[in-house]
Image (cartoon, rainbow, N blue to C red):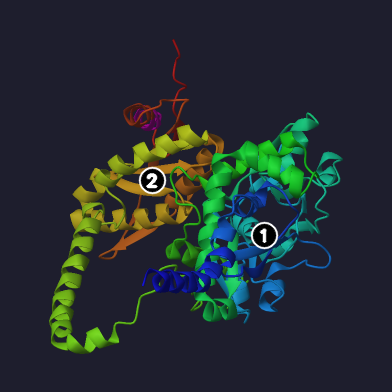
Amino acid sequence: MMNKRHTLLLFLGTLVLPSFLFGKPLEDVTLQLRWLHQFQFAGYYMAKEKGYYRDAGLNVTIVEANNKHPHPVEEVVEGRAQYGIGNSGLINERLNGKPVVVLAALFQTSPNVWILRKDSHIASIVDMVNKRLMMTKNIENAELAALFYNEGVNIDKLNIIESTFNINDLISGKVDAFNGYSTNEPYTLKQQGIDYITIDPRKYGVDFYSDCLFTSDNELSQYPQRVKAFRDASLRGWAYALAHPEETINVILADYSKLKTRDHLRFEAAEIHKLMVPELIEVGHMNPARWSYIAQTYYKLGFIPTAHIPNGFIYNPNPPKDYTWLYYSLAISLVLLALIGSITTHIYRLNRKIKEQAIRDPLTGLYNRRYLAEALPREIARAQREMTPLSLVIIDLDHFKVVNDTYGHAAGDTVLRNIATCLTSSIRQNDFICRYGGEEFIIVMAGISIDKVYSRMEACRKEIQNVITTYNNHTISITISAGISMFNAHGTVEDELLKAADDALYKSKTNGRNQITLAQTKERE
């Protein structure tokens, strides 16, 4: 009896043991990079080095961009690679019929910036008009073109020189501005002792994703589990690379490329960490609303035919399961839920409307004092963190009481609405304006110097003095007085900035009204 049992166990063991010894063979896949081997692709190297791809059942070949493999989209769409790295321009590829699916956005902010020599004396986008600008004029650099569009500059009239991708063109003075990566070219300039500045699209309200992992419709439909496994392993590799930069640099230098020095790779790693902010944002996170904003920007620039995100473009790592059988069995419950949902939606919209009304002035539609109390500390904190200019302007309508007393409060309300419209049209997209109370308004302007703030407000003052309000066959004209204060120069907290601007406003009024006055510089003890 015992011999028969031992024989049976031995027979079963011979059937089971090979599966443990040999396991399932790894699936071969290729990842096509968009540039040469460097820290820009560190997460994929470490996913391979630490065995994350192997654990996911994958044997991954990582191919850098070269003459044979220049375009990741073409490589993936034509099946020579299953995965690739692109930027926000992937949305354009999808709209043009290329079946690409974006899996993750690794860089939460694009490293694409304008780089200028400090001795060029160019400090803003407007200063770059009529200068020699080196970049590749295509959708890859849409965020740089958007800077000019947002400032009202005709992009077609710019002096754009096709990029050689060689920073020496800027160093030698061949061009005045160079399109480069904040993670790369600044290191070369520092090494050569050349002072430089960068103009970052973020400071002008243009914020795109970059270095997005993508695949094709074909790969996703045929191998959905493989896509999920590759994505998860890649993101795990990126988390490791960011946490262990020195180990990652060792791997790059040993196995991939010695084109950059160790010190250069350290610089690149530190700058990439700033773009990914893994302490605050989950690695690879994508927000559909952010993609919608990117699509709208491309549409305004004429790069794409519609401002909508194409169907199937954004990957859902947790797709809903098919519960058709459950839907049938719960038909009555769904009807009730729909009714409840309708009521809930109505309440939600009503609450949103109430919240919006709480921060809006009902007469002018502008933000109110309550919104200012919430937004101003936030703007001050950002200005302090990013070391960017922030100005506050207090505006008062001159002799507004006379308008009310002469023509009535309804006429005064009409004047206020007209002035609010005029002020709104005079500010930039990322500025905001509040009705502070009565006939007083406050504008908060970030990212531009106080001289430019003064110029804008002076132009606004001249425009307003020519505005005519017609009410009951009466024509009413009015002027404004304003005071301007600036963060750091006139205060570092809300009350200090408000008081400095209010004192400057008072000076405008005592000096005869219809004028703009800068606050006096704060005395430092």
Where does residue 176 sit, x and y in percent of width and height?
A: 78, 45
Residue designated by label 2: 479
Contact, mark 1 vs mark 2 (Cβ under 8 Å): no
Secondary structure, mark 1, is: helix
Percent x, y of residue 226: 54, 71
Numbered circle sitting on residue 333: none
Closest to the observer, 148 or 32: 32
* 18 displayed left or right of 76: left
Report how many numbered discs are placed on residues in the image: 2
- Quadrant location of the N terminus in the rendered image: bottom left
Q: Position of residue 201 (x, y in %)?
A: 59, 50
Q: Is residue 335 above or below residue 386?
A: below
Q: Residue at x 48, y 45 (%)?
A: 278
* Quarter of the image where the C terminus is located: top left
Residue visible at 45% across and 51% down in the picture: 282
Residue closest to the eye, 463 or 345 = 345
Q: In terms of secondary structure, where does tag 2 sit?
A: loop
Residue segment shown in magenta: 501-511
Tell me the residue that label 1 is attached to.
Answer: 141
Q: Picture quarter containing residue 303?
A: bottom right
Indicate yes or no whether the magenta region holds residue 168: no
Mark yes or no: residue 282 visible. yes
Left or right: 189 as drawn, with respect to 496: right
Front position in the image: 390 or 238: 238
Q: How far is mark 1 from mark 2, CA to CA? A: 43 Å
Q: Main secondary structure of the magenta part?
A: helix
User: Alpha-carbon neighbours of circle 1 within 10 Å: few (<14), some, or many (≥20)?
Assistant: some
Amino acid carrying label 2: it is Thr
> Of label 1 and label 2, which has the lower sequence position?
1
Q: Is residue 386 left or right of residue 334?
A: right
